[in-house]
Image (cartoon, rainbow, N blue to C red):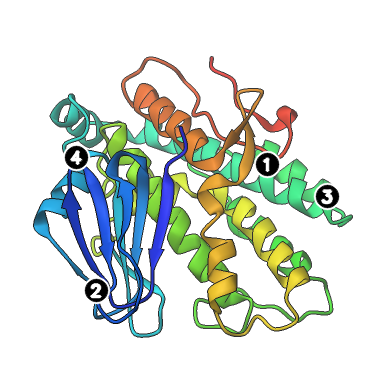
Amino acid sequence: MIKRTIFISNPTNIFKKNNQLILDFPDRDKDSVSIPIEDIGILILDNYNIKLTLALITALQSNNAVIINCDEKHLPQGVMLPFWTHSNFTERLWMQMEASEPLKKNLWQQTVAAKITNQAYLLNMLDVECGNMLSWSKKVKSGDPENLEARAASWYWEHLFGEDSGFRRKRFGEAPNNLLNYGYAILRAVVARSLVGSGLLPALGIHHSNRANAFCLADDVMEPYRPFVDQLVLEIMDAHEEFEDLTPSIKKELLQIPAITVTINHNKSPLMVALQQTTASLAACLNGEIKRIKYPGFYESNDNDDE
């Protein structure tokens, strides 16, 4: 079942009562709102005058919900994750720590190939030539020593918004970088939530290894999912004449990322549900039970089957 994403941008007192999340608005003439805690997957807090109780935080964590807080620019700043939602957490932690380099390189090979394939299919949907990218996706070697991911990314960003757009993918670059940044932050949190739900520690990556990054594995796993965010950003750009600012209406559309429909294992599925299959298959790969991670695609032909 897909969980709800709750976005709060007004001064609000939030607390738990009878297994419900209660929203009380002290500065507004509005009745309190009640939401079942078990229905919540993501809680986004975008106002410095929001107050919430420890009892609520604990209840949300017990139900594997993610809490995201935003900064003064209204961009996601931090993520609070549960760590004890899987019965074999310690066993899987050791499994991650003891994973061999050849295994991690193989899993990264699969991840890069899936990412490039999804990028190519999105370009194809836009009537952009992508035969070279499909070729690169099949040539990725263990660990991607030739860095085909970067070569594909260069072609992809050059053509995604049109060759005449002059777009450059930069974290602090001009729009639509702001839409991509916000969307990727939401995606990253959803991936981290799913990893924890599968008993995996988001900090221990298969490729990313920055010591200052507590979400290395989330950054690995989210790569093939990024094109689905890119597609949503394209749709937002088509629907809005102005998108230099993250307006409430644009944020509302970006918050639909967990519900995006993807194809995985020959079935249509909400992105958040597909992620559960991806992270569970990753855990099984690390444990030696299967050889391939289940990643989603735009079409059935882009699915990954078990071996």
Give the side of residue 42 with respect to residue 136, left or right: left
Residue highlighted by disc 1: 137
Looking at the picture, tell me which residue is in the foreground, 196 or 268.
268
Q: Earlier in the sequence, mark 3 or mark 1?
A: 3
Q: Are marks 3 and 1 in contact (CB under 8 Å)?
A: no
Which residue is at a point 26% across and 52% down the rendered structure image?
Answer: 21
The vertical placement of 248 against 19, above or below, is: below
Residue 269 image offset from top left, x and y in percent: 59, 33
Instruction: Tell me the mark number nearer the camera, choosing from 1 and 2.
Output: 2
Instruction: Tell me the mark number nearer the camera, choosing from 2 and 3.
Output: 2
Instruction: Tell me the mark number nearer the camera, choosing from 4 and 3.
Output: 4
Residue highlighted by disc 3: 124
- Classify 10 Å Cα crowding around label 1: few (below 14), some (14-19), many (20 and above): many
Residue highlighted by disc 2: 50
SS state under label 4: helix
Which residue is at a point 29% across and 78% down the rendered structure image?
Answer: 11
Give the side of residue 24 with respect to residue 248, left or right: left
Q: Which mark is residue 62?
A: 4
Q: Amino acid at mark 4?
A: Ser
Spatial CA span between label 1 and label 2: 46 Å
Which residue is at a point 35% across and 46% down the rendered structure image?
Answer: 40
